[in-house]
Image: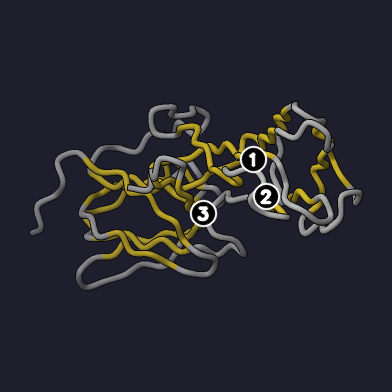
Amino acid sequence: MTQLQKVGQAFPLNIPAGKSVQVNANGTNAYLIVSTAPVNMRARRQLSVQAYSLYAQGTGFEQTEFSSVEVQNPNSAAVVCLLWVGTSNFIDKRLILNTQTIQQAAFPTYSAASSAAAVAINDLSGGPFTDINGNKWLAISRIAIIVCNVDSGVTLLLQKSGAATSSGPAVAAIYPLTSLNYPVSGNYALSVGGGNINAIVSEIYLAIPAS
């Protein structure tokens, strides 16, 4: 018989839409510490494989010894998971935010002022990103968009995704030499209708380390 793990291990996963990943780890328990959407999971043994069951964040299963866990993303968007596999009993603490594992990380959306004529601010939730120091993360959800307008004369508009003018539909204005902290998800854009944008843009995400 395969020797079981003494404690267990957490595995960060980034699963594209409609795809599956296999976590090769022995155990009797598996549960989702973090999952940005429900996923299908099943235990695999050397000579058998079970049918998938759907699990949400904070849930999992306890079974006889297995050698791996297969996780399938049935959703139309990528999913970020932190899957724990081991031999301890499952505990449901889905309402408790693990601040040691889940951290706030900044994505440098537009880190050099006056370097481009348009800024796309696309929501990275459910996917990977690298912060300004080269650290790799898996984004759970966006906390905020931060726009610092370093221009002394131009007012910027936080516009809908793909905006190409300076006066299109917008959700917020950033006046000269001021900053905006906008706590929202979704896709947005900056444009001045020509010429480079004199601003610094970053996004703050709840995220887990990618490894």
Q: Quadrant of residue 135?
A: top left
At mark 3, the secondary structure is loop
Q: In this view, does 171 lie above or below 116?
A: above
Q: Residue at x 54, y 59 (%)?
A: 78
In space, the residues marked 3 and 2 are separated at their CA atoms by: 14 Å
The spot of residue 5 in percent (x, y) is 16, 46
Crowdedness of circle 1 by 10 Å Cα count: few (<14), some, many (20+)?
Answer: many
State yes or no: discs 2 and 1 in contact (Cβ < 8 Å).
Answer: yes
Q: Earlier in the sequence, mark 3 or mark 2?
A: 2
Foreground residue, 206 or 195?
195
Give the position of the N terminus as an image quadrant. bottom left
Where residue 58 appears, x then y in whole percent?
47, 40
Residue at the image position 77 percent from the left and 59 percent from the top: 162
Find residue 121 and name its label.
Answer: 2
Q: Which of marks 3 and 1 is nearer the N terminus?
A: 3
Instruction: Name the residue carrying label 1.
Output: 201
Q: N-terminal of the two: label 2 or label 1?
A: 2
Q: What residue type is labelled 1?
A: Val
Q: In this view, does 185 lie to the left or right of 58?
A: right
For numbered disc 1, what is the local secondary structure? Answer: strand
For label 3, the residue is: 127
Query: Of 59 and 84, which appears nearest the observer?
Result: 84
Residue 171: image location, x then y, percent: 84, 40
Q: Which amino acid does label 2 sit on?
A: Ile
In this rendering, the label closer to the viewer, 2 or 1: 1
Helix, strand or loop under label 2: strand
Taking 181 as reference, is 19 above or below it? below
Picture coordinates of residue 4 (x, y %)? 14, 49
Give the camera-side residue of 158 and 185: 158
Q: Distance between the residues labelled 3 and 1?
A: 19 Å
